[in-house]
Amino acid sequence: MAKNARASLVVKDLTSGAVRRLEPTPQQSPPGATRPFEGGAWDWSADGKWLLVSGGWPGPGYDPSFWRVEWPSGRFHKLPIHGDVIDVNEISADGSVVTGSESTGSAGQVPFVLDVATGKRRFIPKPPGVDPTIGIGNDQVYLSGDGRHVVTSWKINDEDIDRVVQLSRVSDLKVEQILTQRNTGLTALAGAVGVNYDGSVLLLGCMRRPPAPYFIPADLYRYNRLTRGQTRITVTSKGVPLNSSIDRIRGSADQRTVLIGTYANNLVKGDAPVGEWLPIRANDVFTVEIDPLQH
């Protein structure tokens, strides 16, 4: 809210407390750029060598760009995509593949896979036998840790809250499995929010009721797509469901630790009461440790 404030891209060392700002070199800025770079980080590769970043220089003709940032050198490498109709989501463990989505008008937000070395961007085909389909967007295009699978979510139409989760091979984008409300048994499936190293375990978001006009997940399940076993994550230590929505979900590579943001007030003793779906404060963030023996 401060006058002339900008969104700085920073990395904080939690051990030393040191904060470091990252930005492109002056030579990488467009002609006539007069303001500092405004950026945000979307993902960090599992090997710790690459950050996936978006940003630009505000002003006339604003044209957001996307970058891989080397760590720890902080050098910026521009990706061959740009524009305010494109979003990015994840970068592979070795930094060679980036996922994202692009708004294509009537087709909605369509997911893609970008090969960094060649600059080739491939759109992920919609699930067979489901029409019309609209991609959910950048927050639901996930890569398995081994870089072999990509998970996307689709909605059937603007009114239907049921979603389709699609697991495809990165190599040729061939569909390997389709998950729906029917074959998972999960009511009001909201879509995928994460995948483990080899693509065998997914994090799936579900609704308990639709807070029109928005679609906000309220439950999170760890789903083994091979055994069809599922574990409900969004419960208190006493097994009581959270009493509000969840967001900002991020799972570790093995999906045994999950970071969750929630407006629920039944997790912390003495937390301020809120009306369901009508929070009166900023959300809290929790980490959830999942028993490795559970599937």
Image (cartoon, rainbow, N blue to C red):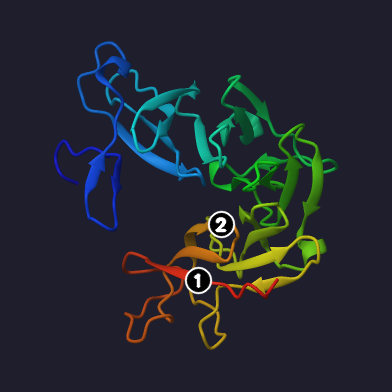
Which SS class for mark 2? Answer: loop
User: What residue appears at the point 69 percent right and 60 percent down from the top-left corner?
Assistant: 201
Q: Is residue 268 above or below residue 21?
A: below
Query: Outermost residue toward the top?
Result: 31
**Image side of residue 22 versus residue 257, left or right:** left
Which numbered disc, 1 or 2, marks the residue that appears first in the sequence? 2
Q: Which mark is residue 169?
A: none
Asked which quadrant contains residue 123, the reply is: top right
Q: Callout 1: few (<14), some (14-19), or many (20+) C-alpha neighbours within 10 Å?
A: some
Q: Callout 2: few (<14), some (14-19), or many (20+) C-alpha neighbours within 10 Å?
A: some
Q: Is residue 264 above or below residue 35?
A: below
Residue 5 in picture, x, y percent from top left: 19, 39
Which SS class for mark 1? Answer: strand
**Which residue type does callout 2 highlight?**
Phe
Task: Kindly indicate whether the residue at mark 2 contacts the one at mark 1 (C-beta within 8 angstroms).
Answer: no
Asked which quadrant contains residue 147, the reply is: top right
Query: Outermost residue toward the right?
Result: 129
Residue 242 in picture, x, y percent from top left: 51, 76
Mark 1 or 2, closer to the camera = 1
Residue on which disc 2 sits: 215
Q: Which mark is residue 288?
A: 1
User: What residue appears at the point 35 percent right and 22 percent down from the top-left corner?
Assistant: 62
Residue 21 in picture, x, y percent from top left: 25, 38
Q: Nearer the viewer, residue 244 or 78?
A: 78
**Which residue type does callout 1 highlight?**
Val
Q: Nearer the viewer, residue 32 or 243?
A: 32
**Image side of residue 277 versus residue 59, left or right:** right
**Image side of residue 263 versus residue 38, left or right:** right
